[in-house]
Every structure is written in structure tokens, then in C-alpha cells.
Image (cartoon, rainbow, N blue to C red):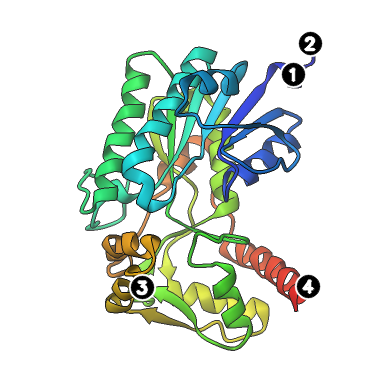
């Protein structure tokens, strides 16, 4: 048996992070199986189905050495799906005898009073934050019981190329390239941590490769926080445009929520953009010697993608 056949890595989810992670793992010569509810493969072995079906979860993760849970249902489906799909991931990983690396966010910390660390109090101020507390406990309890070794990697809001479920979507890129202002929630002049999407995938891969990572929560590599406006201007300079932003007021988000379930769910999360929102990644850097991609490099890569994407679409 060849080494890459023995080291099967299963990625649950093929979205913004799962697809990047698959590319990185394949680049290491590893066998990768991607699991998603629907759609086509992008080069990885593909299985289509719902991991809430435990029989399917066992088949999907059979033979895995590491399972990466990158699943994230739409906001308005979290109450019905979030814990159920995580439970399916744990079930499949346990049946396979695999370790599980789970992607997480920062909602469980609520309104921070300073930089968020892995040992910051869990004090959610939203329904989604409360669900994330339950989710973390579900995963860590599986690790404590010996059922599944679990490592949790938390990231802040994503920055980078082709991120349709983020502030830096195609709509944002088109607007600034057209000389218009991009749209940002809350106060764009407050410090806000953005985690480069490539670093999210690389961070999860790093956790999966180190046995010492399991049984712990980790903040994935994230550059020092700066304001949303400053980051947008960096991107603008790289694109040769102004890169200005304007804040979207709460009342407008509430109004949009009348027609959009997604926007309706965003309202309770606006606090993140109405106060300094800073992530501390020092634990990860100290343990693994891995730092975030320099902001200038991340911006240059994102700008290069935007120029190619939108010049081709023009």
C-alpha cells in the first residue's frame, strides 16, 4: 500500500474553506475525500450525502486518518442543523478511528472586553453564540471521553478571494472597482480582526498534522487587527482604486431582513462591528511556529484574483 493511500483525509464541506483545504492536502500528495450535500468534485474524491444520516457518515469517513469538519449551514438553519451535522461528523470519525479537526468562529465569546484568547470567558450575547457554546462542548466532551480526539480551530471574519459569504464578496469587489464605496457593517473605523482564508485552511492542516493539537482550542493565524476601512484601502491601492467603504446602519440591515432570512439573522451579530473585535493568535504561533500571511501579501493575492475575475467578466 502506498503512503498516500494509507493517509486518507476526509473533508466535510466543500465551500470557502473546505475547497482550499482539499487543494492544500492534495498538494502534499495525500489522498483526499470531500463530502458535501450536492454538487460536483473539484479534483478530490467525492461523496455526496447528509452526515446527519449516521449510516452515510460511517461510509463517508471510512478509512480516514483525519476528518476536517468545515460544514456550516445557512444562519437560519443553525437551530435545526448545526449540532446535528457536528454529531454526524463525530459519529463517523469515531467509527473510523480518526482524529477530528473542527473549524469554528468566535461567537461564543460574545462582546469582548479586550483581545479574544482561547481561555477567554464564554459569554455569548446571541442565539448563534449560545449554539456555538453547545457545539464546542459537544466536540470537547467527545475528546474528553476518549471517543474522538478533537482539535478546534477558531477564526475571525474571513478575508481573501472568492468569499461570497463574507464582506469581501463579488458585490464588494465590483463596487470598488467601479469607483463606488464598498459596504461594511457597523463602524468601519474600529479595529477588527480578519483572518485570511488561505491561513484558515493552512491552520486546520497544521492542527491535523500534530497530535499535541488535540484536546484543545486554537485561534488560527490572524494578522494584527486594523480597521475595516484601512484594509479596504489597502485592497483599493492594490487594485488602483480608492477602496473606500461606507457603514451599513442597523435600521437598513433590519429592513433588508424583512425579505431575507440571512440578513434577518445578521442583525444580532452586528455587535462585532460596533466595538473593537480583536483575536489573539499567540498560542498557535508559539506552539507551531506558524504566523499569518503578511497583510500585504494577502491583499496582493486577493487583488490579483479580483483583477482576473472581473476583467474576464467585463
Q: Which residue is mark 3?
A: 256
Q: Which of marks 1 and 4 precedes in the sequence? A: 1
Please state the horizontal and vertical placement of residue 41, each as a whole percent of the image. 71, 40
For the N terminus, the image quarter is: top right
Against 30, is 312 above or below? Answer: below
Q: Which residue is mark 4?
A: 312
Viewer-closest of 254 and 301: 254
Mark 1 Cα within 10 Å, few/some/many (few <14, many 20+)? few
Disc number lying in front (2 or 4): 4
Q: Which of marks 3 and 1 precedes in the sequence? A: 1
Q: Residue at x 55, y 27 (%)?
A: 67
Disc number lying in front (1 or 3): 3
Q: CA distance from mark 2 to mark 1?
A: 7 Å
- Disc ID at residue 1: 2
Q: Tag 3, which secondary structure?
A: helix
Mark 3 Cα within 10 Å, few/some/many (few <14, many 20+)? some
Q: Circles 3 and 4: CB distance less than 8 Å?
A: no
- 110 relative to 284 in the view: left or right: left
Q: Circles 1 and 3: CB distance less than 8 Å?
A: no
Disc number lying in front (4 or 1): 4
Q: Residue at x 49, y 40 (%)?
A: 71
Q: Is residue 97 visible?
A: no
- Disc ID at residue 5: 1
| Most distant residue in the front direction | 259
Q: Residue at x 65, y 76 (%)?
A: 238
Q: Which of marks 4 and 2 precedes in the sequence? A: 2
Q: Is residue 253 visible?
A: yes
Q: Tag 1, which secondary structure?
A: helix
Q: CA distance from mark 2 to mark 3?
A: 55 Å
Please state the horizontal and vertical placement of residue 230, each as a whole percent of the image. 47, 76
Q: Circles 4 and 1: CB distance less than 8 Å?
A: no
Amino acid at each position: 500500500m502506498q503512503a498516500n493511500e494509507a493517509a486518507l483525509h476526509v473533508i466535510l464541506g466543500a465551500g470557502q474553506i473546505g475547497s482550499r483545504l482539499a487543494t492544500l492536502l492534495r498538494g502534499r500528495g495525500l489522498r483526499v475525500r470531500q463530502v458535501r450535500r450536492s454538487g460536483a468534485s473539484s479534483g478530490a474524491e467525492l461523496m455526496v450525502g447528509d452526515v446527519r444520516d449516521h449510516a452515510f457518515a460511517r461510509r463517508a469517513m471510512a478509512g480516514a486518518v483525519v476528518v476536517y469538519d468545515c460544514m456550516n449551514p445557512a444562519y437560519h438553519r443553525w437551530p435545526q442543523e448545526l449540532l446535528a451535522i457536528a454529531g454526524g461528523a463525530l459519529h463517523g470519525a469515531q467509527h473510523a478511528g480518526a482524529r477530528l479537526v473542527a473549524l469554528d468562529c468566535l461567537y461564543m465569546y460574545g462582546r469582548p472586553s479586550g483581545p479574544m484568547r482561547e481561555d477567554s470567558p464564554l459569554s455569548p450575547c446571541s442565539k448563534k453564540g449560545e449554539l456555538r457554546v453547545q457545539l464546542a462542548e459537544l466536540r470537547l466532551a467527545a475528546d474528553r471521553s476518549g471517543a474522538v480526539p478533537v482539535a478546534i480551530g477558531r477564526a475571525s471574519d474571513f478575508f481573501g478571494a472568492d468569499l461570497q459569504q463574507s464582506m469581501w464578496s463579488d458585490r464588494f469587489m465590483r463596487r470598488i472597482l467601479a469607483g463606488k464605496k464598498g459596504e461594511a457593517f457597523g463602524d468601519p473605523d474600529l479595529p477588527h480582526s480578519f483572518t485570511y482564508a488561505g491561513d484558515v485552511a493552512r491552520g486546520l492542516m497544521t492542527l491535523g498534522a500534530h497530535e499535541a493539537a488535540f484536546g484543545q482550542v486554537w485561534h488560527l493565524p490572524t494578522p494584527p487587527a486594523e480597521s475595516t476601512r484601512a484594509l479596504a484601502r489597502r485592497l483599493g491601492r492594490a487594485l488602483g482604486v480608492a477602496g473606500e467603504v461606507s457603514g451599513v446602519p442597523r435600521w437598513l440591515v433590519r429592513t433588508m431582513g424583512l425579505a431575507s432570512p440571512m440578513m434577518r439573522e445578521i442583525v444580532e451579530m452586528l455587535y462585532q462591528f460596533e466595538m473593537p473585535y480583536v483575536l489573539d493568535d499567540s498560542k498557535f504561533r508559539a506552539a507551531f511556529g506558524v504566523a499569518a500571511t503578511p497583510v500585504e501579501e494577502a491583499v496582493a493575492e486577493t487583488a490579483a484574483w479580483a483583477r482576473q475575475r472581473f476583467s474576464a467578466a467585463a
